């Protein structure tokens, strides 16, 4: 057997071993999958008002991956506060964007969620740092607070009549 034949046979053997090794590691490695997202927060859709009628929050579907909302608080028949809202599905969960008084948005990222509730957080924001929505039957509860739950404010909403 000539030198060229031995070198060619060794290359073939090395390539065969390398290919088998790569196949083994590919089969042994766990399949990577994207992180699990919260269930679609379609339970948020609709018109919601506090029992006093002073605050109203409305959510509507914009696309499969978007919900748009707004919040208006009235006092003495005047607008005391308003904000635009957006929930957007991302690869790593839902992102919540709040545009208070029409200002630039503040982003909050999904921290936890379950059937009928979602919590988003932004620890770098002054206040709120945590926002949680939870639906229980015909009631929607919104809560804002510091990251540790301190200085919490809660709104209990019912479905709008009109």
Image: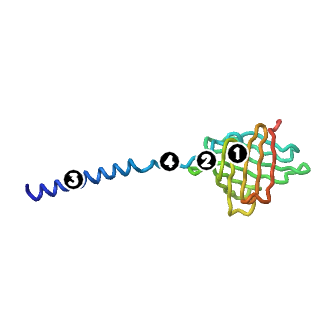
Residue at disc 2, secondary structure: strand
Left/right placement of residue 23 relative to residue 6 reads right
Left/right placement of residue 131 relative to residue 3 reads right
The front one of 53 and 13 is 13
Residue at disc 4, secondary structure: loop
Q: Residue furthest left?
A: 1
Examine the image and state in which quarter residue 48 appears. Answer: top right
Q: Position of residue 79 (x, y in %)?
A: 85, 51
The first of marks 1 and 4 along the sequence is 4
Left/right placement of residue 46 relative to residue 18 reads right
Between disc 1 and disc 3, the foreground one is 3
The first of marks 4 and 3 along the sequence is 3
Residue at disc 1, secondary structure: strand
The front one of 157 and 97 is 157
In the picture of the structure, the residue carrying the numbered disc 1 is 117
Q: Position of residue 140 (x, y in %)?
A: 77, 43
């Amino acid at each position: 057997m000539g030198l060229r034949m031995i070198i060619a046979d060794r290359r073939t053997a090395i390539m065969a071993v390398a290919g088998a090794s790569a196949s083994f590691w590919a089969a042994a490695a766990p399949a990577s999958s994207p992180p699990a997202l919260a269930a679609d927060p379609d339970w948020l859709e609709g018109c919601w008002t506090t029992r006093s009628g002073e605050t109203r929050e409305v959510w509507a579907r914009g696309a499969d991956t978007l919900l748009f909302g707004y919040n208006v608080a009235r006092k003495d028949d005047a607008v005391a506060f308003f904000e635009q809202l957006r929930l957007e599905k991302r690869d790593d969960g839902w992102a919540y964007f709040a545009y208070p008084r029409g200002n630039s948005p503040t982003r909050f990222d999904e921290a936890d969620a379950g059937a009928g509730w979602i919590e988003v957080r932004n620890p770098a924001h002054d206040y709120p740092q945590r926002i949680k929505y939870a639906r229980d039957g015909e009631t929607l509860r919104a809560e804002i607070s510091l990251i540790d739950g301190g200085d919490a404010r809660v709104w209990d909403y019912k479905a709008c009549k009109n």
